[in-house]
Structures are given as C-alpha cells and as structure tokens.
Image (cartoon, rainbow, N blue to C red):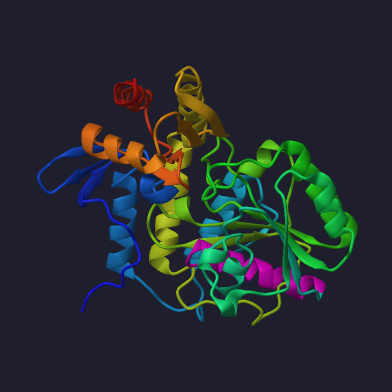
Amino acid sequence: MELFDVYSLYDIEPVRGKGSHVFTADGTDYLDLYGGHAVISIGHAHPHYTEAISRQAAALGFYSNSVQNSLQTRLAELLGKTSGYDDYHLFLCNSGAEANENAIKLASFATGRKHVLAVGKAFHGRTSGAVAATDNPAIQAPFNKTDNVNFVPLNDIEAMRSELATGKYAAMIIEGIQGVSGIHEPTDAYLREAEKACRANGTKLILDEIQSGYGRTGQFFAHQHSGIRPDIISCAKGIANGFPMGALLIAPDIEARKGMLGTTFGGNHLACAAAIAVLEVMEAENLVENAAKVGRYLKEELQAIGKVTDVRGRGLMLGFEVDGYSGSELRRELLFGHHIFTGGAGQATLRLLPALSLSMAEAQLFINEFKKTIL
C-alpha cells in the first residue's frame, strides 16, 4: 500500500528535536522557524512535557468521556486563569477543524439560525462545515458548497455591518490573524465593530485562534490586542505541543445541553496531560512575553532589509515577501542551503511560526543567514 498523494514533500526527514532545532538521521541540525505549522509552542522534546506524557501513559492513556476525568477540570482551571477567560466553559476535541465545526454548530443551536458570515481569504479547516466557511474553492468538494455561508472582505466595516444587519446570521467567524492566506490582520477597529454589530443583531462572534492563539502574538489570544471578548474561541495547534487536540472556550451565557456536542477522543488523559504541561511551561518560562520580545526584534530586523517588503503580523507569527524570490525558492534555499525551516503561503509569502521559546540568539542566527541568502 502507498500513501495517498496529498503533500509536496521536501527531501528531509527530521528524526528528533530539541527546543527550536530538529535533526535528521545523519545529525544535520536545522533551526526550526516553522514549528510544524505553529504547533510546537514550547519547543521540541521539552523535558517537563515529555515527562508529563510518559507519566500519564504509564498510568492511564485513555478512557472515554463517560467517566469523570479530573485532568479535564485541571486543564479548564489552568487555561481559564492563563487566558483571562476563567468565567468561560471549555469543550475539548481533537483538532482545529473539529473545534470550528463545533463552534458553528453551537452558535446555530444557540440562535436557531443557519447562516454564517465569514471573511475573504479565510481558512478554518478541511472538514465539511469548516471548509464551507473557508474562502478557497479548490478545497471545497461539491458536497461542501452551501448557500448558508457568505463572505465579506477583511477589514471592510461597512460590508460587515450591512450583512449582520440582516439578522439572519448565527455566527460570524474570523481568524485572530489570517495564517494560510499569508498573515493578514483584522484591524482593532474592525474587530471592535464586529463585536458591536454581532451583539446588536443577535449573532455569535467566533474567533478562530487556532494558529494565532496560545501566546503566539505576544498576548494569549491575538484578539486580546483589540480588547474584545468573543462568544466562542476555537483553539488547537499549540495547545498540546504536537499531541492532537482542539478546544472551544464558550461564553457563560451559551447554554450547554447534554448531547448537544460530543467526542470520543477529545479531552483524553494523554491529551490533557500534554496540554497542562504546555501551560505550565508557558507560565514558568514567560513564553508569551518572550514571543512578544523576540517577535518584535525579528520584525524590526526584517523591516530594515531593503529587499524585504510588507512585514506583517505580531509576535512570532510573521509573514513577508522578498523582491526577486518566490516563497518556495526562498524556503528551499534556506532549508537546504542554510539549514533553516520556514513556512510559506501562496506564491510569495514566507511565514515564520517558531516555538514561543525561540531565543534572541536563534533569531539573530536566522537574520544573519537570511541576509546571506538574499543579499
């Protein structure tokens, strides 16, 4: 049996990792500024994390959600305290797409409505409802296409207000920062007006913080830079540092009825142990503050390079272009020529999504090697 041909693969196989570095079988060291697509939040093979998973696996790796699981309660308490949403409720699942599926479903249950407002160039996942709210026809099968989702341009306040004023939308869903489309931010004014318009029209505001959350932008969630409080927040990627997990933070006024949502594997013992360890490391090592500091340095250094254009994003979620290079050419030269992993978006954008533990010395190493590549 062969693998279904889905991904274009680089001719590199990391076999182990440590911090912000991954290593191939022959010992070649690569600086990882991609974090497995923003998943590695506290660094590869962090000793506290690996010990927590190993200890839990030796005790009880899994039991279903038909019994009590005190690890879920501990995670909810810790996440509420760390994020500033201690009055919200927590639903645990397995991935970002599943989180967004349940967020949309929950908003529809709460409002009795069936329409969703999304934003141009959005990416919310590849499962049925999530991909319907994704502005990319190439990944929507005929089954996924629906008249229940409409799109408005990012940061067009009047278009957003006009749609929400119809009163037909169960939810508006928006990324804290658009990742797949190339690191595009909603303005503070746009998010504040979206919150206001949703409240006025009985629409639930869903913030997709799957890539932009968990400290990546220098706040726990990217939308917190704007001072808003959404009705539902979806999380995944960095939540468990590579262990498959997703979550929803749900405002206390949204009713939880038994049987409304459900999951077999969500919130299992190993996933919770991993997620608790992530939050413990983030607090002990001040990783949110580190993401803000190191990200600020990277952005300033990149903006000072003449060939680099339009540096976007916050903290350790950055995107930019380089005159004379396509994104794939540049990633390949950095990967193979300078042993640095980076990400991309579209034809031209380079994305940096490293672990929140990236050091200033590692950031300086990237800038030095990057200049050698393009200058």
Say which residue appears at 48% left-offset and 64% top-offset.
95
Q: Position of residue 374 (x, y in %)?
A: 34, 25
Q: For residue 103: magenta?
A: yes
Q: Which residues are magenta?
A: 93-111
116 relative to 284, above or below: below
Say whether residue 65 is left or right of residue 206. Answer: left
Q: For residue 123: magenta?
A: no
| Location of the C terminus (image quadrant) | top left
Q: Position of residue 204 (x, y in %)?
A: 77, 61
Regarding residue 42, the answer to whether it shows in the image is no
Q: Which one is in front, 182 or 20?
A: 182
29 relative to 154, above or below: above
Q: Position of residue 193 (x, y in %)?
A: 82, 45
Say which residue appears at 78% left-offset and 71% top-offset.
110
Q: Quadrant of residue 77?
A: bottom right
| Location of the N terminus (image quadrant) | bottom left
> Magenta segment, principal secondary structure?
helix
Q: Position of residue 38 (x, y in %)?
A: 44, 47
Say whether residue 47 is left or right of residue 200. Answer: left
Say whether residue 350 is left or right of residue 49. Answer: right
83 relative to 73, above or below: above
Q: Which one is in front, 11 or 235?
A: 11
Q: Quadrant of residue 359?
A: top left
